[in-house]
Amino acid sequence: MRSIPVVSELMFCLIPSCVLAKHHNQKLRFDKYGRFKILQVADMHYANGKNTLCLNVLPSQNASCTDLNTTAFIQRMIHAEKPNLIVFTGDNIFGFDSLDSAKSLDAAFAPAIASNIPWVAVLGNHDQEGSLSREGVMKHIVGMKNTLSKLNPTEAHIIDGFGNYNLKVGGVKGTSFANKSVLNLYFLDSGDYSKVLPILGYDWIKPSQQFWFQRTSAKLQREYKKGPVPQKEPAPGLAYFHIPLPEYASFDSSNFTGVKLEGNGSAGISSASVNSGFFTTLVGAGDVKAVFTGHDHINDFCGKLTGINLCYAGGFGYHAYGKAGWSRRARVVVASLEKTVKGSWGNVKSIKTWKRLDDQRLTRIDAEVLWSKNSGA
Amino acid sequence: MRSIPVVSELMFCLIPSCVLAKHHNQKLRFDKYGRFKILQVADMHYANGKNTLCLNVLPSQNASCTDLNTTAFIQRMIHAEKPNLIVFTGDNIFGFDSLDSAKSLDAAFAPAIASNIPWVAVLGNHDQEGSLSREGVMKHIVGMKNTLSKLNPTEAHIIDGFGNYNLKVGGVKGTSFANKSVLNLYFLDSGDYSKVLPILGYDWIKPSQQFWFQRTSAKLQREYKKGPVPQKEPAPGLAYFHIPLPEYASFDSSNFTGVKLEGNGSAGISSASVNSGFFTTLVGAGDVKAVFTGHDHINDFCGKLTGINLCYAGGFGYHAYGKAGWSRRARVVVASLEKTVKGSWGNVKSIKTWKRLDDQRLTRIDAEVLWSKNSGA
């Protein structure tokens, strides 16, 4: 394992998105190069820093490996990719081993905060196992520096879970798309464990959340189709949450990019044991082009079903189970804008993704186009 | 085919439920024998009465068989079972062949109206194919005599479809359960066809409807657990709609009662091609013990999954496809109350079902207990 570099805030304030992070309510927007890049960090499983050892690493790594390796990996990823937004998709902390959930959260998100890049998080199934409840964890997150996370949408009077919200990403400043949300990000709480007997296993996204998502998507689509520059097609959307949907089991190596190394359950997918219909709701809404989850640390694939990419990030954290010799990893997504005939920036032309491994060179793997405006998919 | 008996209103006004039908807003309640009986009529496919011929009947029946045979079957069923409520689960009319949807609806429901028994209906996928839209059909139904059907719940501001509503069934008059809903009936619009490309096939129950159902169920459970006579367990619920859920494909002859004669699709079930999660929502709510649909005319089974019975009624109407020599049929459900220690009537003890065939003797088949208070299921 490598030594942990010290990250200076100053270094990151040279990158374009830095200015956006100054205020919570400032809008996300595409940069002057017509790009918006998201770094997804899945399953940090952070506990107590240097006192918390790594799981499933090679014998040669074992002695010195702690939560600080997770910290170092975030720092290196931020430095290498300079994302416009960092998304933590749950199991941010491993509550069961944490001595103090608030401290674990502070330490886990410290590199994101230090970077001055806007960041958000959703809950996994382990975040609430320590000294804070799910509501407590999410409230703590919402109060942290530079985060755009929200506890829940104010417009929904009743909603299950904590950490359901959406973010708009505006077009390039000074263009006619500057005040339109050309990319929509949805964040949902996929819960922890079933509270409903006799259903066992993981939780699912509830009707209240789906109804909120559906109405939000419809509202965003209505706005997008109005002036200025009325659009015919909805702006693409991306959805982030922790537990994969049952439809993740639809793929095998013949139709996904990446790997499925999980062996638990015949399909190697730890979704809820029941289908709560969110995939159908996503297809029905029509704007979401890709879903990004974590939860299954040694699955890292993307597969496309009914026009929607279902992607894992692959496990990131060192105190999370993994596979010795199989590098911890992170997923990057870049949306790129179209150049208009007048040479300005238009709406989203394509969405690409790749992963990086936590090896010497942060090796970039599995680059692929998830969605392209003119492909008809 | 038999001759069609003339039904007099008077005859039916001798039965206990008759008095209930006088006013739309009068509550449904269990009779003095502690029973509440529901007759389910699925897929009448009514068109133009005596000018509309039957489908799939034996050559010997062919010449004289019309929609009036459907009428006669309803009359015979009502006379034989004297239900407290009649539920029509969609494809009430076959809009495509109807010359006037309003007239077809009037003729289709005429025997129910004449009986003075309260009745309700939901929409199928064929009701809107004539001169009225889905909203138009449901509005027409709601305006008819003796029906307790509603267009949509007033408390839900946004809901998909037409004909989503619930009915409470009170305990026996004069008992301490008289003002409690001891049996809850849910009616939903399962739509017609997918409006979402690339999903083909039948429609599904949307998040807005599921959210309404979930809130309604929760509210009813809260009320039931309060005084007078606070209850620990929720009152059992029954859900009626047209298109079966994908989970209907979970059964075979080894674990269902009835038959599956449909051959379209490998599973012999014409549900939506996607899972919209309503089964999960039903399990989550915890009160619904059985779901009753139509749509697949030559399936008539009940199977139990995760504590919930999934039942077909079997095809009722003569202008609907069927199977020559395989009798048209209807499903009956009876909920029975428990006798309290004081000799009064308490809450629901059991829910039984059977079917009757439209043969000479209205043969009763497939009687089974769907739910029993003390079975733990």
Image (cartoon, coloured by chain):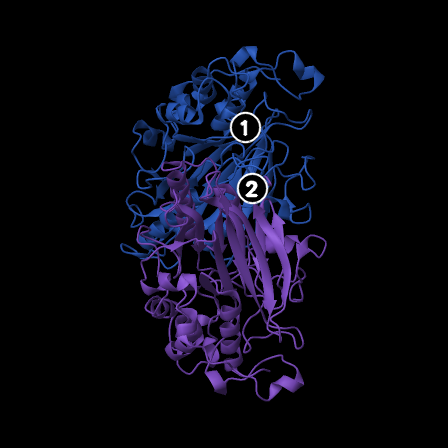
Chain colours: A blue, B purple
Residue A72 percent across, percent down from the top left: 53, 20
Instruction: Please state which of residues B179 and A354 is positioned toward the viewer in this rendering.
Output: B179
| Crowd rating for badge 1 (residues with CA inside 10 Å; few <14, some 14–19, many 20+) | many
The reply to whether residue B127 is in sight is yes
Chain letter of disc 1? A
Horizontal side, residue B277 vs residue A265: left or right = left
The reply to whether residue A372 is in sight is no
Residue A223 percent across, percent down from the top left: 31, 52
User: From what the image shows, is residue B309 above or below residue A55?
Assistant: below
Q: Residue at x 64, y 47 (%)?
A: A251
User: From what the image shows, is residue A208 above or below residue A373?
Assistant: above
Count of numbered tags: 2
Q: Please tell me the numbered disc located at residue A43.
A: 1
In the rendered image, the quadrant that contains the N terminus of chain A is: top right
Callouts 2 and 1 in the same chain: yes
Q: Label 2 sits on what residue type?
A: Cys
Residue A30 percent across, percent down from the top left: 37, 41
Horizontal side, residue B86 vs residue A200: left or right = left
User: From what the image shows, is residue A350 above or below residue A364?
Assistant: below
| Crowd rating for badge 2 (residues with CA inside 10 Å; few <14, some 14–19, many 20+) | many
Instruction: Please state which of residues A7 and A51 is positioned toward the viewer in this rendering.
Output: A51
Earlier sequence position, callout 2 versus callout 1: 1
Horizontal side, residue A57 vs residue B370: left or right = right
Q: CA distance from mark 2 to mark 1?
A: 14 Å
Q: Secondary structure at mark 1?
A: loop
Instruction: Please state which of residues B377 and A61 is positioned toward the viewer in this rendering.
Output: B377
Q: Residue at x 52, y 65 (%)?
A: B81
Q: Label 1 sits on what residue type?
A: Asp
Residue A112 percent across, percent down from the top left: 43, 24
Q: Please tell me the numbered disc located at residue B168.
A: none
Task: Check disc 2 and report the residue beneath it.
Answer: A311
Instruction: Please state which of residues A280 and B131 is positioned toward the viewer in this rendering.
Output: B131
